[in-house]
Image (cartoon, helix red, strand yellow):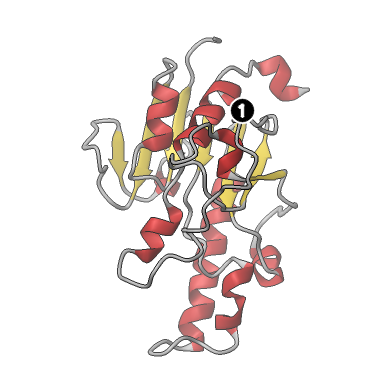
Amino acid sequence: MTKPMRILIGCECSGIVRRAFAALGHDAWSCDLKPAEDRSNRHIVGDIRDLLDDGWDMLAVMHPPCTRLTNSGVRWLSVPPPGRTLEEMWQELEEGAALFSACWNAPIERIAVENPVMHRHAKERIVNFRPHTQSVQPWQFGDDLDGPDNVKKRTCLWLKGLMPLRATGTLDGRTARDEIHKASPGPDRAERRSRFFPGLAAAMAEQWGGIVDERAAA
């Protein structure tokens, strides 16, 4: 393992990604508008944009608000859901694109931002936008048929100064559950759908945490 890095995990309150990096000896912190579920003292409650200039070695934004940026939600920009207005939908799009832009263009050498596939309106609003580096599925990093990683959820990664992830699991996707897309409606539906995956988090920590400056710049 290389020397420990100061790593900021953005938009995370579960602690799943933070703990994966910390387990390898890195100085990992998470930040979210919500308190940490595990009550860790290595969690900052607040806007991640207030922390981007604090000298981090790596920024991993794993759960940015993406509802208005994704292809699956583009229809609401034409016909808003009940009780909402078009003005609110477009304002949320602007806010989501601004947050993505701030993280993607942060003065940090190694950056990873997770998001589903974006529609053209989002791409037009993101500063220095470029296509995602890779897309992965949680089951590619799992070994347990009944475990939390054996699910279907295409996860796109925008990477800067980091290598694309290599699959580490033994699952082949044929038994992957579709529970995320079929999540029942309710007040916690968005939170359940955005929850991260321990196998994928471990792969990020192992593969990105071991990257030295020469490889990152290659």
Residue 65 image point, x, y percent = 47, 59
Q: Where is residue 8 in the image (x, y as percent from the top left)?
A: 44, 34
Q: How crowded is mark 1: few (under 14 residues within 10 Å), some or many (20 or more)?
A: some
Q: Which residue is drawn at 52% across and 58% down?
A: 178
Residue 198 locus on image (x, y percent): 45, 35
x and y percent of residue 18 in the render? 40, 32
Q: Is residue 61 above or below residue 59?
A: below
Does the rendering let one see residue 61?
Answer: yes
In the displayed structure image, the side of residue 105 where residue 66 appears, left or right = left
Report the residue marked by disc 1: 168
The residue at the far right in this view is 218
Q: Looking at this view, is 151 or 92 the one in front?
A: 151
Q: Using the image as rendered, state which of residue 196 and residue 149 is in the foreground.
A: 149
Q: Give amino acid for label 1.
A: Thr
Q: Which of 62 and 86 is in front in this view?
A: 62
Position of the N terminus, as image quadrant, is top right
Q: Residue shown at 25%/43% (left/top)?
A: 37
Looking at the rendering, in which quadrant would you find the C terminus? top right
Q: In this view, does 33 lie above or below 133?
A: below
Q: Residue reaching furthest left? A: 39
Q: Can residue 54 be seen in this view?
A: no
Q: Would residue 162 be found to the left or right of residue 65 on screen?
A: right
Q: Which residue is drawn at 44% across and 41% down?
A: 146
Callout 1: helix, strand or loop? loop
Task: Give the image quarter of residue 167.
Answer: top right
Based on the displayed image, in which of its 4 quarters is residue 94 positioned? bottom right
Count of labels in the image: 1
